[in-house]
Image (cartoon, coloured by chain):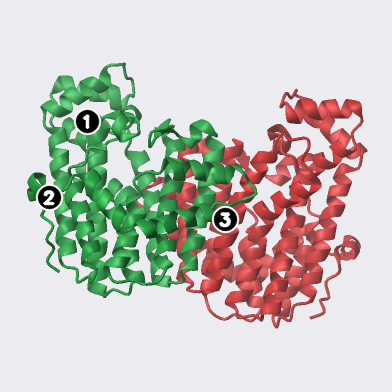
Chain colours: A red, B green
Amino acid sequence: MRLAAKTSDQADIAGRSFPEAVAALRQLTDEDLGAVNAAILDTMRSPAQLIPDIAGHLVQAGGKRIRPMLTLASARAFGYRGDDHIKLAAAVELIHGATLLHDDVVDASALRRGEDTANVIWGNKESVLVGDFIFARAFELMVAARDLKVLQILSSASGVIAEGEVLQLSTQKNLAATVDMYLAVIEAKTAALFAAATQAGAVIAGCSEADEAAMRRFGLNLGIAYQLIDDALDYSGVEAALGKRVGDDFREGKMTLPVVYAIARADGEERAFWRRTIAEGRQQPDDLAAARVILDRNGALADTIACARRYADLALEALDEVDAPGAAYAEALAELASASARRAY
Amino acid sequence: MRLAAKTSDQADIAGRSFPEAVAALRQLTDEDLGAVNAAILDTMRSPAQLIPDIAGHLVQAGGKRIRPMLTLASARAFGYRGDDHIKLAAAVELIHGATLLHDDVVDASALRRGEDTANVIWGNKESVLVGDFIFARAFELMVAARDLKVLQILSSASGVIAEGEVLQLSTQKNLAATVDMYLAVIEAKTAALFAAATQAGAVIAGCSEADEAAMRRFGLNLGIAYQLIDDALDYSGVEAALGKRVGDDFREGKMTLPVVYAIARADGEERAFWRRTIAEGRQQPDDLAAARVILDRNGALADTIACARRYADLALEALDEVDAPGAAYAEALAELASASARRAY
C-alpha cells in the first residue's frame, strides 16, 4: 500500500508529535489494550504476595505501552478477528517488563517511569526472582496462543535481548567501542523485541511471507530509531518529562552513540575527559553538564538524532511495501515511526 | 507394570546406593546424555564471550544431571525413537542452570558443585543477564521440539519454580513457617521441574493420559524426596562430598523442614537460639555446630529423612501404575527413587 504518512523529514514540518502519534495509536487499540492490561494482571495472580505487588507497580507505572500496541496494531492491520493477539501483546509487554526489572538491578537504577524502581522499593533479590516469574508467565501466555511460528519468533527474540544486555555490559567503559558495536547492542537489546512484536502480530493474523518480512523490518528499524533517541535523551532530555533520571548512561559508562561520536571527534583535552569519566568512572558533580556541552558543540547529539531519522525512514519504507487491509492501523503505525525520531520523552 | 525394585524401606537393606543408582541411570542414557551436553554447548554459542564462558563453567562443573536423565529415561521407557527428547532434556537442564545462576546471586552463594559460583567469578550483573539468556535459550529448544502440550508443561513449570523461589524468600527468617508452607515451597522450587521432566519425556513418546499423570506424580514425589534430603544434608552433609558449603540454609535463615520441626519441639532456651540465629540473623562462629546438635537430639533430622522416604515411596507407587515397554529404563528410575531418600551427597 502507498501510505499517506510523510517520511520523517517532511514530517518534521507537518507530522504529528510523538506523544500525539502514541495517543492516536492508543485510541485505535484502546479496547484491545484494556484486555492486555487485564491479561497481565490476571497472569500475575499468586499466593506469593510479592508477585502481584511488583507486577502491579510495573503495570501502574504504566509506561507508554508501545510494544504491545505494535503487536495489536500489526494484527489488526492484517484484519485479525480472533483474540490471540491479546495474549501475544501481553507476552511482549511482560518480556519487556521482566527485562526492565533485571536491568534496573544490573544498572542499580533508582527511577523509572517517574517512580522509584522495584529494586529500590523491594530489593534486588526480589526483582531478580519476580523478573524470572514474569518472564516465565510471558512464555505461558504465548504458548496459550498455540502458534509454533509465533513461539519461535518470540522465544528467539528473548534470547537476543539477553544477549544484547550481555554485549552492552561488555562494551561498558570501553572507549574503543565502535558505531557497529553500538548498533549491534541496541538492535539486540531493544529492536529485536520491536521486530518480534510487529512480526508476531502480522503472523497471527495470517499475513503473507513477504508482509511478514516487511513488518519485521518495520519493527526492527523503528526499534533502532527509538533507542537512538532514548540514548540522545539521556543527555538532552528533561527529567520530569522523561520519567527517568537523565545522565544514567553517563554515570554507568555506557558507550551510547553520542559518546561514540564524541570520542571519535575529541581533541586531546576531551579525550582525557572521556577517559576519566567513562573509562575510569571517576566523575565529579558537574561532569554531566560538561559532557552535554561537548556533545552539543561537536554535533554528536545532532548526528545521533539524524541517525535515528534514517532508521525511522527505513521503517517507513518497509511499511510502504506492506499490503494490509486495515489502513487505519497501518497509518497509525506509520505516524508513530514518522514521529519516533522527533520525540522528547 | 510390576517393578522389581524394592520400596525404599526394603531398599535400605538391599538396594543400590544413590551414587550407584545415578551411575546406572547415566550408563543407560549415556549416548543421549552426550547429545544433551552437545546441544547445551551449541545453544550457548554467542559473540558475547561471557555467555559461553559462564555456560561452560556451568556445564563443566557438571552436577549430577538428574533432571535431563529423568526426561531421557522417561521418553525411552515409553519406547521413544525420535530425537526431540534430547532438546527437551537440554531445555530442562538449562532451566535448572538458569535458576542456579539466579539463586546464587539471590543467596550470595560462593560454592556450588565444588567450584566457585559464577557470581563470585564474573559478578552478579553478569550472572543475572546470562541466566536470562540461558532461560530464553531453554525456551527456544523446547519450541524446536514442536509439541504444544510439552511446551505448556515446561513453561508452566518455569513459572511455578520462580513462584517457589519468591515464596521461599518470603518465608525466610519467619519462625512461624509451617510444614505445609515448607512443602509448598519445595514442591514449587524443586519438584515442579522433576515432575515436568518426567511428564514431558513420557508425553513426547506418546504415552497414554493415565501414564502421563502417573509419570508426573513419580517426578513430583521424587523431587520432594530429593529436596528434603538436600535440606537435611545442609546440616548433616560432608562439604567435600556435597560440592557445596554446608550450613548455607542456616546462614540465610531458610525455614527448611529440619528447622521447622526443631522449632516446634524447642524448649525456651532453644527457641531463643532459633530466634537469634534465624529470625534475627545474629550468628556466631559455632552456632551451626550447636544447631546440628539440637537437630540431632530432638530427631528433626531423622524425621526429615523419614519424610523423604515417604515421598520416595509415593514416587515408587506412581511408577508401579505405569505401563511402560522400556523395562530397563523404568527399573533405573525406580532404583533412583528408591535410593533418593538415602543419599549422602
The residue located at (64%, 74%) in the rendering is A202
Q: Which residue is mark 2?
A: B8
The residue located at (29%, 23%) in the rendering is B277
Q: Which residue is mark 1?
A: B236
The residue located at (15%, 64%) in the rendering is B320
Question: Dot 3 lies on which element?
Answer: helix
Instruction: Give the number of the disc on residue A159.
Output: 3
Graded by Cα atoms within 10 Å as few (under 14), some (14 to 19) or many (20 or more), the crowding at tag 2 reads many
Question: Dot 1 lies on which element?
Answer: helix
The residue located at (53%, 65%) in the rendering is A36
User: Looking at the picture, how far across and down is residue A229, in whole percent?
Assistant: 78, 50
Question: Dot 2 lies on which element?
Answer: helix
Above-or-below relation of B21 to B111: below
Amino acid type, residue under disc 2 in the picture: Ser
Q: Are marks 1 and 2 on the same chain?
A: yes
User: Looking at the picture, how far across and down is residue A120, in whole percent?
Assistant: 53, 36
